[in-house]
Image (cartoon, grey):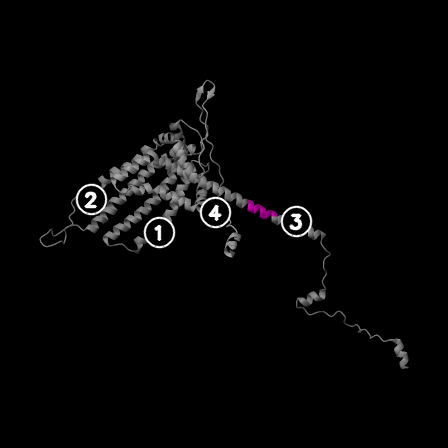
Amino acid sequence: MATQNQAAAKPAKEPRFLLGKFFVDADVVTEPEEPAKIVVAGMAEAKIKKEYPEGYFRKAGAVVRANFSLLLKGSLWFAPAALVFILVFLVAAPFFEDYVMGSGYNFMQNVGISLHPGGDDIGVSVAILYWDVYQPFLMMLAGAGIIATPFIAGLFYCAKRAYFQDHYKRITRTFFMGFAKYWWKFLLVGTVGILIALAMGTSLIYQLAQEQRGAANAGSMAAVVLTFIFGAPLLTVPMVMMSLFATYGMSLKDTFKDALVLIANNPFTTVICGILSAAPLLLLMVNNIFSIIICIAMLLVGFIYWAQCWTALAERGMNKCKALKAYTDKKKLIALRDRKGNAKEASAKAKKGAAPVVYNKAENEEAAGQPRKNNNKGKQPPKPYVNPKKKKKKK
């Protein structure tokens, strides 16, 4: 019972607003309203507000279900850019591997007497596969991804308007409105993110190739460890910035600062969202048939759900940081008010207060360690009192 009472009496942990001084408060951008369709002469089509469940990511799924056909039509404009990446992965990769590796390898070296005396070293061959095939292939994928990044602006703009119920029906016009507004931001930040991922992949492939050759050392392993330690957290910054671009009206500099604040105060949600977003890319490496299934699923529903989840991530992070900022500002205001109140109270007491205390100068000097001055020099000590009656009796 005592333990339970102590646990109940323990105060709740006070929320902390990490990197709060960098936070830039911003509101959701109000988009120009699309003219309503005229149903009957003088009467426009009604715009019905839909009820979505609580919870940011639950709302994202509900928005996809409620506006699936609308969002799918918008994602069709993003599909050609995504197809470049898909074709590189599914078509260009096998041809490139056949071109580099060929089919003339013989691995019967040193098997036995009277067999082929020479042959190829399987370790060297696998190292060539890693460094001469997979690494250029990774660079081709990075190039295809950079080509697709500007078109993500239109996809996210359509997703944002559906998420916040900014009604639209002119899908092509809406998609390219978002493309025109934000394409350069998505291209710049997306390219940085892709280059970080390319550096991580290149270091890993180089390490695997060196291991096959038997030439791996501490330097190559350190390169892998360092690129993943620094690269993985850095990848979250472009991700959060792209989720903010189409939703909140901020400059590139302010978006960068807000991205750092959102990541610091929502680390778990950011990491989970990033892992789930990267999962389809990792699943493409299973086999060709599974890769085709993943690509079709992404074209039909994956891209629109991805855009909705990142929009929900941005709203969740901004709302939490706004609440933390309001709490911190209120706490500072209360502390400032208390200081002013204490200062006024002290001033009032000083005005009313008692007469000033006067201390003996000699006592102050003695307390300070100085010799006490004798101010009675040259004066006779007082004579003792003598009763005159007693004096007369003695006579």
Residue located at (59% from left, 47% from top): 336
Q: What residue type is labelled 3?
A: Lys
Magenta residues? 330-337
Q: Name the residue under label 2.
A: 101
Residue located at (23% from left, 52% from top): 213
How far separated are the C-alphas under marks 4 and 1? 25 Å
| Residue closer to the observer: 183 or 304 | 304
The 10 Å Cα crowd at callout 3, few under 14, some 14 to 19, many 20 or more, is few
Q: Mark 1 points at which residue?
A: 226
How far separated are the C-alphas under marks 1 and 3? 57 Å
Q: Upstream in the sequence, badge 2 or badge 4?
A: 4
Q: Mark 3 points at which residue?
A: 344
In this view, the residue farthest toward the front is: 1
Q: What residue type is labelled 2?
A: Met
Circle 2: element type: helix
Q: Which amino acid does label 4 sit on?
A: Leu
Whether residue 62 is visible here, answered yes or no, is: yes
Q: Nearer the viewer, mark 1 or mark 3?
A: 3
How far separated are the C-alphas under marks 3 and 4? 34 Å
Determine whether label 1 and label 2 are within 8 Å by CB.
no
Residue 333 included in the magenta stretch of the image: yes
Circle 4: element type: loop
Q: Nearer the viewer, mark 2 or mark 3?
A: 3
The 10 Å Cα crowd at callout 4, few under 14, some 14 to 19, many 20 or more, is some
Whether residue 185 is visible here, answered yes or no, is: no
Determine whether label 2 and label 4 are within 8 Å by CB.
no
How far separated are the C-alphas under marks 1 and 2? 31 Å
In this view, the residue farthest toward the bottom is: 395
- In the rendered image, residue 297, in percent from the top left (x then y), is placed at 31, 36
Q: Name the residue under label 4.
A: 19
